[in-house]
Image: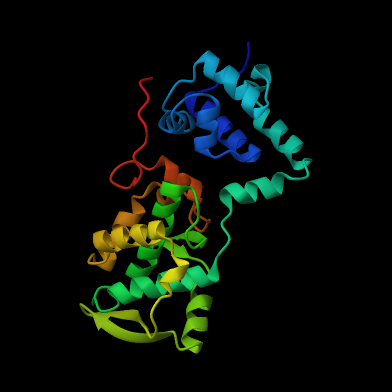
């Protein structure tokens, strides 16, 4: 008898193959003539894959059906893929963001222009406004806004290299760091000393940032931290690890910002 795969295992194998082959969810869904929401449900293990869909997947992703059902399938795929010369380039395009320092600085300045005067907007709230701006934009457009990498830490998602960027901005007299108190707790805050260069932001980017600011900039540090802890990308990531932008496609309401096509199946 062959190895019995659960829906979750099938979904994990399809997701891994998709990423290894350099497909976005949108591209793969179109290739096999299903909606993106259906592919998301398949990869999460919530939807059965029909035989005709599996045959299409095998042709597009390049695997045999017998091989796919084998217990050691992923191990054999890892060995094969490691020998392919261009795989690292493909994986980087799909899942590894590259920080655009100038864009990051101007997004930070823009958020502070809008929010620095609010007494609740200390470092914790600022981190979360950046995180939701970045991940909401990626979910909507499959492109990185700032390209910042976020790590899962106990208090929520934290952008890496932020301290280095902020110190650079302070030295250049773009920002001022101050220490205050808010409701009896010490608070680190940042004040913008110059205006953001909005020419580096597309209208779609500014729109996403504006919506995040409108929704969350009045929340307390505790409220926005608690909210971020229930966002699927943070929730399913192992502590101390980078949070994959691809996980934004698995969000559900109220976190999802994209209206996906419904599939009758």
User: In the orientation shown, which residue stands out farthest toward the top?
Assistant: 1
Please indicate whether residue 4 sits to the left or right of residue 127 in the image: right
Q: Quadrant of the N terminus?
A: top right
Q: Residue placed at 41% from the left, 32% from the top?
A: 37
Rendered image quadrant of residue 56: top right
Quarter of the figure with residue 178: bottom left
Instruction: Decide if residue 12 is on the left or right side of residue 250.
Output: right
- Tell me if residue 208 comes above or below residue 7 in the rendering: below
Q: Is residue 251 above or below residue 111?
A: above
Q: Quadrant of residue 45?
A: top left
Q: Residue at x 67, y 24 (%)?
A: 63
* Percent position of residue 41, x then y: 42, 30
The answer to whether 65 is drawn above or below residue 229 in the figure is: above
Viewer-proximal residue, 101 or 47?
101
Q: How far across and how far down the image is residue 122, in percent? A: 32, 75
Give the residue at x 75% y 37%: 79
On the question of residue 91 being in view, the answer is: yes
78 to the left or right of 239: right
Q: How many marks?
A: 0
Describe residue 154's horizontal placement relative to residue 80 as left or right. left
Q: Which residue lies at the image location 44% right of the left edge and 72% below the top edge? A: 106
Quadrant (top left, top right, bottom left, bottom right) of the C terminus: top left
């Amino acid at each position: 008898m062959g190895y019995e795969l659960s829906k979750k295992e099938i979904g994990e194998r399809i997701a891994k193959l998709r990423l290894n082959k350099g497909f976005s969810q949108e591209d793969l869904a179109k290739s096999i003539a299903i909606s993106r929401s259906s592919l998301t449900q398949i990869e999460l293990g919530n939807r059965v894959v029909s035989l005709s869909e599996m045959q299409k997947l095998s042709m597009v992703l390049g695997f045999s059906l017998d091989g796919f059902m084998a217990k050691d399938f992923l191990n054999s795929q890892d060995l094969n893929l490691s020998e392919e010369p261009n795989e690292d380039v493909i994986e980087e395009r799909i899942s590894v963001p590259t920080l655009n320092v100038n864009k990051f600085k101007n997004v930070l300045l823009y958020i502070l222009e809008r929010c620095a005067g609010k007494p609740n907007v200390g470092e914790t709230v600022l981190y979360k406004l950046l995180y939701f701006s970045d991940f909401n934009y990626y979910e909507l457009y499959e492109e990185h806004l700032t390209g910042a990498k976020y790590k899962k830490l106990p208090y929520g998602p934290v952008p890496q290299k932020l301290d280095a960027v902020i110190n650079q901005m302070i030295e250049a007299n773009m920002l001022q760091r101050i220490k205050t108190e808010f409701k009896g707790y010490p608070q680190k805050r940042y004040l913008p000393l110059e205006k953001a260069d909005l020419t580096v932001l597309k209208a779609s980017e500014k729109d996403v940032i504006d919506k995040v600011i409108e929704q969350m900039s009045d929340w307390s540090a505790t409220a926005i931290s608690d909210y971020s802890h229930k966002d699927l990308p943070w929730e399913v990531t192992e502590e101390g690890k980078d949070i994959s932008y691809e996980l934004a496609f698995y969000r559900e309401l109220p976190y999802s910002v994209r209206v996906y096509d419904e599939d009758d199946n």
